[in-house]
Image (spheres, rainbow, N blue to C red):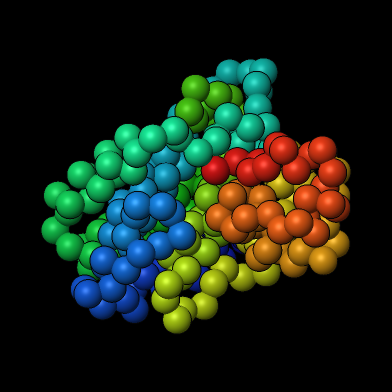
């Protein structure tokens, strides 16, 4: 819960300071400007809110790590353009950021009304609340990196980035290169930065499985 509050608060603070012109700044997500990315972030915050209000019967069929195995970069530009079309219908960056802030605040309130071990449903899966919150932290931290990729703004805090690394280690099934700090791990583990020759030497055959999620 504390990690999610920090992740939402830090990203929300960055977004709130952007100017209308910066809505069209490129991001770390191929084909998306900041406006498109905020639309996607809003969709994910709504996912979290709905999930927290959707109790499920067990058993759980995924967890904070396994949830991400199915999330690989979508082939082609279909997902990119769907988000761009929806974002283009928004009233503007300020309104979209305001809606995002209100939605993330509601997520945090909803999270206080359930126990970490309660089961909820999202994306066709059943998982404990604690694992759902982890997925929201990871999504927010990675997209915070995307949002500031071409802006002079602070990135995510150490705690959320450490959670991203924890998930990546679980997906990898072993340690990541020690010389990677958590930011580097997030960028290279999700394909936002390419692996270097040294990385491939360290990872060996496992390099072929990168990115671990998209």
The answer to whether residue 52 is above or below residue 176 is above
Across and down, in percent, residue 159 comes to 68, 65
Depth order, front residue of 98/196? 196
Q: The C terminus is located in which quarter? A: top right
Depth order, front residue of 115/123? 123
Depth order, front residue of 120/75? 75
Q: Is residue 130 left or right of residue 90?
A: right
Q: Is residue 11 visible?
A: no
The answer to whether residue 204 is above or below residue 62 is below
Quarter of the rendering containing residue 118: top right
Across and down, in percent, residue 10 comes to 50, 70
Question: In percent of the image, x 42 and y 39: which residue is there?
Answer: 47
Q: Is residue 130 left or right of residue 11?
A: right
The answer to whether residue 29 is above or below residue 46 is below
Depth order, front residue of 169/207? 207
| Residue placed furthest toward the front | 197
Across and down, in percent, residue 8 comes to 48, 62
Q: Is residue 160 left or right of residue 23?
A: right
The answer to whether residue 60 is above or below residue 81 is above
Q: How many marks?
A: 0
Question: In percent of the image, x 32 and y 35: which residue is there?
Answer: 78
Across and down, in percent, residue 106 comes to 40, 52
Q: Is residue 89 visible?
A: yes
Question: In percent of the image, x 25 and y 48: which residue is there?
Answer: 84
Q: The N terminus is located in which quarter? A: bottom right
Question: In percent of the image, x 43 and y 72: which residue is there?
Answer: 150
């Amino acid at each position: 819960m504390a990690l999610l509050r920090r992740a939402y608060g830090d990203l929300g603070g960055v977004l709130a300071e952007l100017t209308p012109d910066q809505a069209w700044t490129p991001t770390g997500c191929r084909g998306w400007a900041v406006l498109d990315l905020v639309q996607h972030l809003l969709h994910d915050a709504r996912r979290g809110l709905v999930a927290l209000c959707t109790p499920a019967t067990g058993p759980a069929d995924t967890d904070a790590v396994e949830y991400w195995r199915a999330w690989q970069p979508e082939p082609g530009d279909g997902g990119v353009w769907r988000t761009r079309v929806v974002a283009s219908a928004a009233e503007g960056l300020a309104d979209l950021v305001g809606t995002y802030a209100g939605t993330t605040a509601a997520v945090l309130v909803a999270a206080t009304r359930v126990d970490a071990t309660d089961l909820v449903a999202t994306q066709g899966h059943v998982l404990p609340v604690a694992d759902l919150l982890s997925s929201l932290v990871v999504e927010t931290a990675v997209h915070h990196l995307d949002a500031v990729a071409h802006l002079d703004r602070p990135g995510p805090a150490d705690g959320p980035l450490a959670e991203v690394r924890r998930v990546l280690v679980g997906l990898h099934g072993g340690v990541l290169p020690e010389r990677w700090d958590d930011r580097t791990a997030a960028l290279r583990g999700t394909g936002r930065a390419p692996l270097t020759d040294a990385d491939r030497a360290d990872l060996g055959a496992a390099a072929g499985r990168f990115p671990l999620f998209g």
